[in-house]
Amino acid sequence: MSKKKVILAAGLGVAAGYLAKKQMDQYQKTTPEKALKQAKETFKQQGPISGSWIYMKPEQVERNGLFYDAYRGGITRNIDGENKQYEFYVDVDTGAVIDSVETA
């Protein structure tokens, strides 16, 4: 095989791999790590966070008559010297926080 054909084949392989990755990223759901990061960024707008956790397995939740596949997690914040805990749900498809409540 000539040098030109090898370079052309390698270039086509790289281009095909790049396009396949773009397509996979478009259809891939939010990972638990990304969901936790998004939730932390949302909560940080209200003040500092001292701890966080997330379940790795999504669960189905119903909010306002709609069903979501969501990750459940929690955030601990220190407000006026007192730790307050919040539980939240993050939509698997969009990564948006769909619900949060303060827990006792």
Image (spheres, rainbow, N blue to C red):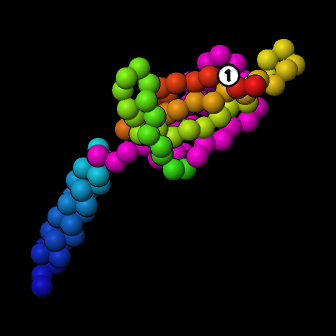
Q: Is residue 42 left or right of residue 22?
A: right
Say whether residue 49 is magenta.
yes
Residue that carries the numbered disc 1 in the rendered image: 102
Front-lying residue, 13 or 104: 104
Across and down, in percent, residue 49 comes to: 72, 28
Residue shown at 70% from the left, 26% from the top: 103
In the image, residue 36 above or below residue 43: below
In which quadrant is the N terminus drawn? bottom left
Q: Front-most of 83 and 11?
A: 83
> Height in image: 103 above or below 29?
above
Q: To which quarter of the image does residue 60 belong? A: top left
**Drawn side of residue 47 relative to residue 56, left or right:** right
Is residue 88 found left or right of 9 in the rendered image? right
Q: In which image quadrant can residue 10 be found?
A: bottom left
Disc 1 residue type?
Answer: Glu
Q: What stretch is highlighted in magenta?
A: 27-55
Image: 79 above or below 20: above
Looking at the image, the residue that sits furthest to the bottom is 1
Residue 48 falls in which quadrant of the image?
top right
**The magenta stretch spans residue 35:** yes
Q: Where is residue 7 in the image (x, y as percent from the top left)?
A: 19, 71
Which residue appears at 58% of the width and 46% of the height?
Answer: 55
Q: 15 or 23: nearer the eye?
A: 23
Residue 97, image x and y in percent? 49, 27
Neighbor class of circle 1 (other Cα within 10 Å; few <14, some 14-19, many 20+) is few
Q: Where is residue 62 in the image (x, y as percent from the top left)?
A: 43, 30
